[in-house]
Image (spheres, rainbow, N blue to C red):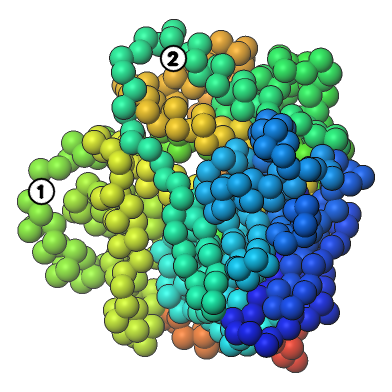
């Protein structure tokens, strides 16, 4: 696992600067603390930071082909590299290392940009071909590894993190208001946008070809059609699923460094641990964290799984220093990011890194097997679909904003929507086009009304889903949005902050394509999500108490923290003049939102967290980078008062 960065001139006569490439890599040392390498020649500069996982002694990057006309920097793991290497040797290619990186170089010689279609794993890479002065950037199918790029004057710059691009071109630090608008809606900025106007993310499953100063982006993979598998019995399905997922797990056990698993005590991670235990003769190292609030502590479930599979179990009960942790993490987040489970993800990554360099996780099960409760909640609400659309539109446009706030007001707005938009509204936080207009200032609303609604991106994904049934359309939507933009982004950022590589077997694209083809009735069965996956868990030996417990996700006691421990240190930041002067909010509405929560009348912890993370991004990333005389973190000042 590595971090990559680089630059290439748009015009002839420009020469890359090795010192700039070095600085681009230095700011992402946490992604690869073991090694630095660079190739700088003429118009191109490629750099990388390496976290050594495979071929520790000869895996130094960048790596070239035999005659050094093609060079690569690469972040990720290709799990089928051994069979690819054997095939390429048979074609006459000479290998100098035992790395998966070198296999990609020779695969590119054979197939050009189509080489990416042969790779099975997670990756982001850059290949420079001196023969035609071209640069190829590629990102894996599901977006497990990040890749950003920007055109700045005479240069295309790219990197695993935005910080690298800003190191090469500080002028790129111009806030993208549409990216911030998207953040208010979803708690993240969807690809290909970023929080910076000129910086873009290469979307999952896409390539970027740069030649003669021109950028060409094309998609090389998408989810296949849903529900195309022929009739299949549960037993046949379970046998095939166990075989395929076991293969995906085994492939991810290849490592020259210590390896373990993150164990939440949920269905997905428990299956992964169970299959790991079957595939290895040594006890699996497992890692779990819990909180000192009993209603949020789930370590006893993880402990049951650890006992069932005789793992070498490590757990840590936290009364976390949230203020201190945010002070440490927010300067490195680069974009505002509202998923509060970044904290437990960071803590469990930190715990795991004390013992291993690689950890497997169970991410992806909800999107593959309809595990989110919001699916069943939406289907139950669909029984209320008796309201004429014109009446619902009249309520939303003419009546909703004239009625005072009351419990259930948001529910009424939601059920007045068509079914598709009802789901998108349910995963939206502060849609300025709809039910939350009161929060925003008149100037911000006036601007937001002049640009395309962020909801349209989600509507397009839903409408274009290769699926005939409603549930599969939702699965496609979440796999294209929430999974890469939130879940995988969170896992990548927090694990890399601790220099830990995380591998995700359920998102092996071969396994995923097979699951996609299954009938939806095997995923959501009589309003029970993950139906066939839970059957597999029973088959593998996951304790029944774990399988039938209430689903919580990676839950945290946010509501308690924001009314007690964090009220002074964090929540009150939102009411400071410095926050209000940014122009996003109606001061009256924001004060009312904070007071509703702190008084105990309503739980608004998740909404407040979203607003707080935006403000901390402004203070701890933007203003700190700008070199202002303001304190680089408001938290440290507040904590000292």
Disc 2 packing (10 Å; few <14; some 14–19; many ≥20)? some
Identify the secondary structure beneath mark 2.
helix
User: Is 471 drawn above or below residue 450 in the view shown?
Assistant: above
Q: Residues within 10 Å of mark 1 (few under 14, many from 20)?
A: few
Where's residue 81, x and y in %? 69, 37
Q: Is residue 364 visible?
A: yes
Q: Name the residue: 52% across, 85% down.
A: 582
Q: Residue at x 71, y 74 (%)?
A: 44
Q: Can you identify the residue that label 2 sits on?
A: 237
Circle 1 is placed at which residue position?
387
| Relative side of 618 to 225, left or right | right
Residue sitting at x 62%, y 51%: 108
Task: Left or right? Give the position of 441 relative to 344.
Answer: left
For mark 1, give the secondary structure: loop
Residue 235 is situated, as x and y percent measured from the top left of the image, at 44, 7
Residue at the farthest right position: 57
């Amino acid at each position: 696992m590595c971090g990559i960065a680089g630059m290439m001139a748009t015009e002839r006569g420009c020469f890359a600067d090795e010192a700039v490439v070095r600085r681009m890599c230095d700011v992402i040392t946490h992604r690869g603390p073991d090694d630095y390498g660079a190739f700088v020649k003429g118009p191109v500069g490629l750099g990388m930071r390496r976290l050594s996982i495979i071929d520790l002694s000869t895996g130094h990057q960048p790596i070239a082909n035999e005659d050094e006309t093609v060079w690569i920097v690469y972040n990720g793991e290709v799990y089928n590299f051994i069979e690819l290497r054997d095939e390429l040797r048979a074609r006459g290619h000479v290998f100098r290392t035992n790395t998966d990186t070198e296999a990609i170089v020779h695969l590119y010689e054979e197939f050009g940009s189509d080489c990416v279609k042969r790779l099975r794993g997670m990756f982001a890479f850059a290949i420079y071909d001196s023969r035609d002065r071209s640069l190829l950037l590629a990102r894996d199918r599901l977006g497990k590894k990040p890749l950003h790029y920007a055109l700045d004057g005479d240069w295309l710059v790219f990197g695993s993190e935005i910080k690298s691009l800003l190191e090469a071109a500080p002028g790129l630090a111009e806030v993208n208001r549409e990216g911030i608008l998207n953040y208010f809606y979803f708690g993240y900025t969807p690809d290909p946008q970023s929080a910076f106007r000129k910086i873009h993310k290469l979307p999952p499953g896409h390539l970027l070809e740069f030649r003669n100063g021109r950028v060409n982006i094309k998609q090389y993979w998408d989810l296949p059609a849903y529900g195309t598998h022929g009739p299949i019995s549960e037993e046949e399905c379970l046998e095939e699923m166990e075989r395929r997922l076991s293969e995906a797990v085994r492939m991810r056990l290849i490592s020259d460094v210590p390896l373990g698993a993150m164990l939440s005590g949920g269905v997905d991670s428990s299956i992964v641990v169970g299959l790991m235990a079957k595939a290895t003769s040594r006890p699996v190292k497992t890692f779990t964290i819990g909180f000192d609030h009993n209603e949020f502590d789930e370590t006893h479930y993880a402990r049951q799984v650890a006992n069932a599979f005789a793992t070498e179990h490590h757990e840590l009960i936290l009364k976390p220093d949230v203020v201190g942790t945010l002070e440490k993490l927010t300067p490195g987040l680069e974009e505002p990011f509202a998923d509060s489970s970044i904290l437990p993800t960071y803590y469990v990554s930190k715990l795991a890194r004390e013992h291993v360099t690689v950890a497997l996780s169970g991410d992806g099960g909800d999107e593959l097997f309809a595990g989110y409760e919001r699916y069943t909640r939406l289907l139950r609400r669909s029984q209320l679909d008796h309201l004429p659309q014109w009446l619902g539109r009249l309520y939303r446009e003419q009546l909703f904003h004239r009625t005072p706030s009351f419990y259930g007001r948001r529910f009424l707005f939601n059920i007045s929507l068509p079914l598709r938009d009802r789901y998108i509204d349910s995963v939206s936080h502060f849609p300025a086009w709809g039910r939350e207009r009161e929060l925003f200032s008149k100037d911000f609303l006036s601007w937001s009304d002049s640009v395309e609604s962020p909801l349209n991106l989600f509507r397009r994904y839903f409408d274009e889903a290769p699926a005939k049934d409603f549930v599969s359309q939702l699965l496609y939507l979440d796999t294209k949005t929430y999974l890469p933009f939130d879940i995988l982004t969170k896992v990548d950022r927090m694990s890399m902050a601790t220099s830990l590589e995380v591998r995700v077997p359920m998102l092996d694209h071969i396994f995923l394509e097979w699951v996609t083809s299954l009938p939806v009735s095997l995923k959501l069965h009589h309003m029970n999500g993950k139906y066939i996956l839970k059957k597999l868990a029973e088959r593998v030996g996951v304790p029944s108490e774990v399988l039938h417990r209430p689903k919580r996700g990676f839950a945290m006691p946010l509501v308690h923290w924001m009314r007690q421990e964090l009220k002074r240190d964090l929540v009150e930041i939102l009411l400071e003049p410095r926050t209000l002067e940014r122009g996003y909010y109606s001061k009256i509405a924001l004060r009312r939102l904070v007071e509703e929560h702190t008084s105990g009348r309503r739980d608004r912890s998740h909404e407040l967290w979203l607003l707080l993370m935006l403000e901390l991004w402004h203070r701890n990333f933007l203003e700190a980078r700008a070199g202002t005389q303001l304190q680089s973190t408001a938290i440290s000042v507040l904590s000292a008062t």
